[in-house]
Image (tube, helix red, strand yellow):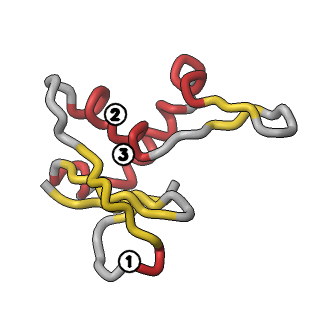
Amino acid sequence: MKEVILNWTYYYDKIVCPDFVAEHLSDYQIKFDEWINQPENEERYLVKTEDGEEALCFNSDAFVDWLNECMIGNGEKAVYVQRDILKKGEMRFKLPTINF
């Protein structure tokens, strides 16, 4: 298992996932982007903005749930979020990172 950072513009979440996910993180991010933009999936994450436009809104939990349910399976929680959320200025270590 490896630690990975998910960067959400204003904060970071650290997740723990199988080595094969961490080693191909950008591939999993691309697959997640394709999955969440499918009409049957995106409706769960659509919100209306103040001007009435619809936009996707999701966080680390959506990515972790997708990895567990769609990519890893077996009914196991192979990926989980470590809720010690870090502010950008506190980032003092190098871990694989993806940006949302």
Q: Secondary structure at mark 2?
A: helix
Q: Quadrant of residue 3?
A: bottom left
Which numbered circle lies on residue 45?
none
Which mark is in front, 3 or 1?
Answer: 1
Q: Is residue 95 left or right of residue 20?
A: right
Instruction: Give above or below for 7 relative to 59.
Output: below
Q: CA distance from mark 3 to mark 2?
A: 13 Å
Q: CA distance from mark 3 to mark 1?
A: 23 Å
| Residue at image point 18% right, 35% down | 77
**Residue extending furthest toward the front:** 84
Instruction: Give above or below for 75 relative to 68.
Output: above
Residue 52 is situated, as x and y percent measured from the top left of the image, at 84, 32
* Mark positioned earlier in the residue sequence (1 or 2): 2
Q: Secondary structure at mark 1?
A: loop
Which mark is in front, 3 or 2?
Answer: 2
* Mark positioned earlier in the residue sequence (3 or 2): 3
Q: Residues within 10 Å of mark 1 (few under 14, many from 20)?
A: few
Residue holding disc 2: 65
Q: Where, quadrant-wise, is the N terminus in this rendering?
A: bottom left
Q: Secondary structure at mark 3?
A: helix
| Residue at image point 27% right, 54% down | 82
Q: Say which of 99 and 34 sits in front.
A: 99
Q: Say which of 24 and 42 sits in front.
A: 42
Residue holding disc 3: 28
Residue holding disc 1: 91
